[in-house]
Image (spheres, helix red, strand yellow):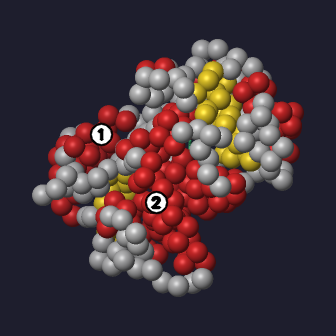
Amino acid sequence: MAAPKHFLQFRDLARDELEHVFARTRWIKETFKRYEPYRPLVDRTMVMIFEKQSTRTRLSFEAGMQQLGGAAIFMSTRDSQLGRGEPVEDAAKVISRMCDIVMIRTFEQDTVERFARHSRVPVINGLTDEHHPCQILADLYTYIEHRGSIRGRTVAWIGDANNVCYSWLQAAEVLDFRLHVSTPPGYEVVAARAGSGGTAHYALFADPLEAARGAHLVTTDVWTSMGFEAEADARRAAFARWQVDEAMMRAAAPDALFMHCLPAHRGEEVAAAVIDGPQSVVWDEAENRLHAQKALIEYLLLGRVGS
Ligand code: CP
Ligand code: NVA
């Protein structure tokens, strides 16, 4: 049996594979908007395993599988044997004999990597503490949809060096754009996790306004990610200057976009005037989770359809 293809980190897809997935995202979205059925996955099943909460990820994968003609089964670690200490390796062997593709949202990246090593079917990372590659797939598609190729452009990341930030860092390396990162002291990017060794694709800024200067896209995320709630008070104090506000958007390029993976906290990491303002594309970004992930699922299960 050939080894399945997984999407566990952003760099699991090469540039030409991403270009294919983005082209398919466009076709799948347009076809869906015309109410034309596209059901290549009749009788195929996705198992979705959640160890953390979700609105967008669950809904986009579940709706996406249904729209492609397949089915999606939700499993939470609270009400399955996964929460009672069944080894990940055993769970992977059993679950992957009963379905065609698996999506996992959990804490440690090591859990999805171990699951994937023992799975007969493709595994998709639906967010871990370290990475959120599906989010960046949708974000990049959203950028392309609004502004064209991201190659050579500058993206400003303001805030926590978290899972979403590391997926952006990998994307910058794979797709050849620059990431300007500004984090508060004590919450910096870990260089060893930021890419394959070179730093040509990113630059660090102590001042968030300088990171935003001239950027074509400004993006941020919550100050406290899931699993880090005990640090929320300390983070609120440390991140106070790292709010994306109107001054930051004025420092960016005149046609800069604003993105946020959501859920957002207005008045913390982003000012209401920015997220609800004219440069914000957060609703397109959220919708594009659906279309981009349908293209991803199609690619992992069926290969290069349509090319
Ligand atoms: N952006 C994102 O992954 O949202 P959910 O946590 O609602 O899935
Ligand atoms: N960084 C956030 C993203 C939520 C979609 C978290 O991990 O909670």
- Upstream in the sequence, badge 2 or badge 1? 2
Please tell me whether residue 272 is drawn above or below residue 184 in the rendered image. below
**Res 188 seen here:** yes
Nearer to me, 292 or 132: 292
Q: Residue furthest top?
A: 185
What's under tag 2, amino acid-wise?
Val
Q: Residue 21 carries which label?
A: 2
Q: Could you tell me residue 281's position as x and y percent? A: 72, 54
Residue in the image at 12% along x and 58% along y: 1
> SS at mark 2?
helix
**Res 76 seen here:** no
Residue identifier under label 1? 113
Dot 1 beta carbon under 8 Å from ligand 2: no
Residue in the image at 75% along x and 31% along y: 212
> SS at mark 1?
helix
| Crowding at mark 2 (Cα within 10 Å: few <14, some 14-19, many 20+) | many
Position of residue 62 in the picture relative to residue 271 (left or right) = left
Q: Could you tell me residue 266's position as x and y percent? A: 77, 42
What's under tag 1, amino acid-wise?
Glu
Dot 2 beta carbon under 8 Å from ligand 1: no
| Crowding at mark 1 (Cα within 10 Å: few <14, some 14-19, many 20+) | some
Position of residue 199 in the picture relative to residue 125 (left or right) = right
Residue in the image at 40% along x and 69% along y: 307
User: Cα distance, mark 2 to mark 1?
Assistant: 22 Å
Q: Which residue lies furthest to the left in this view?
A: 1
Position of residue 77 in the picture relative to residue 255 (left or right) = left
Nearer to me, 190 or 55: 190
Q: Which residue lies furthest to the bottom in this view?
A: 36
